[in-house]
Image (cartoon, rainbow, N blue to C red):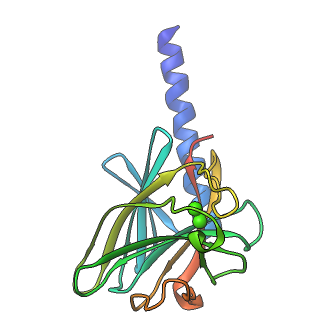
Amino acid sequence: MEELELIYGAISRFWKNILSFLAICCIAGAVPVSNDGKNSVIVNDQYQFEWSVSGEDIYFTVTAQTTGFVALGVLPETGMEDEDVCIVGIYPDGTVYINDYHAHEPSIPHLDVEEGGTEDWLLVDVSETETATTATFYRKLVTADPLNDQPILPGVARLVWSYGEADPTDFDNIILQRETTGVVEVVLVEP
Ligand SMILES: [Ca+2]
Ligand SMILES: [Ca+2]
């Protein structure tokens, strides 16, 4: 009996993985790859990310081919308004920055703290080479700032990926450029 349950579990996981794979391929055209048990998505040759869930927290590591900022956002189930965006990077002098944003209209994010909200994306590490920035950051799956953040729930999540060619000179005056911004749908937390 136990053996049967094990086989059933393995088959069910297999199909779940296949369905996740197909969901990502069909919706976003991105190719998911497995990396040391972590989940990861190559959005294109300029941007890729990994994620892992630990208790109530979700960790992301984003690598983008830029020495400017990298950004990752969470969209509501439908529509392009109310993006919840994390923007992170490192200045040439080594100073790092990470800020939590809310975009009422697509691609024009405003600092959560300027709107009575809280910083919920927290930095683990950011580093830069001559051509690329890699940042690891995390937040609670469901933050205590519902007006400015989107919850990350089991099932398909709609994410915004973005990067900028330069570091921001004004944290509350950033526009996510169309050429370097897109949406990817991915199962971050298994239903
Ligand atoms: Ca927030
Ligand atoms: Ca936010």
- Left or right placement of residue 49 versus residue 158 in this view: left
At 56% across and 46% down in the image, what residue appears? 189
Q: Quadrant of the C terminus?
A: top right
Residue 153 coordinates in the image, percent (x, y): 64, 47
At 61% across and 78% down in the image, what residue appears? 110
Task: Name the foreground residue: 48 vs 127.
Answer: 127
- Which of the 4 image quadrants contains residue 42? bottom left
> Where on the image, by quarter, is ligand 1?
bottom right
How many numbered discs sit on the rendered protein? 0
- Left or right placement of residue 121 versus residue 105 in this view: left
Residue 109 coordinates in the image, percent (x, y): 61, 79
At 53% across and 17% down in the image, what residue appears? 5
Task: Name the foreground residue: 57 vs 179.
Answer: 57
Q: Please, which residue is most extreme toward the top here?
A: 1
Q: Is residue 15 above or below residue 185?
A: above
Q: Is residue 77 above or below residue 174?
A: above
- Left or right placement of residue 13 versus residue 45 in this view: right
Residue 146 coordinates in the image, percent (x, y): 68, 56
Residue 29 in sight: no
Task: Name the foreground residue: 116 vs 68.
Answer: 116
Residue 91 coordinates in the image, percent (x, y): 30, 84
Q: Is residue 112 above or below residue 141?
A: below
Residue 28 in sight: yes
- Left or right placement of residue 92 versus residue 63 in this view: left
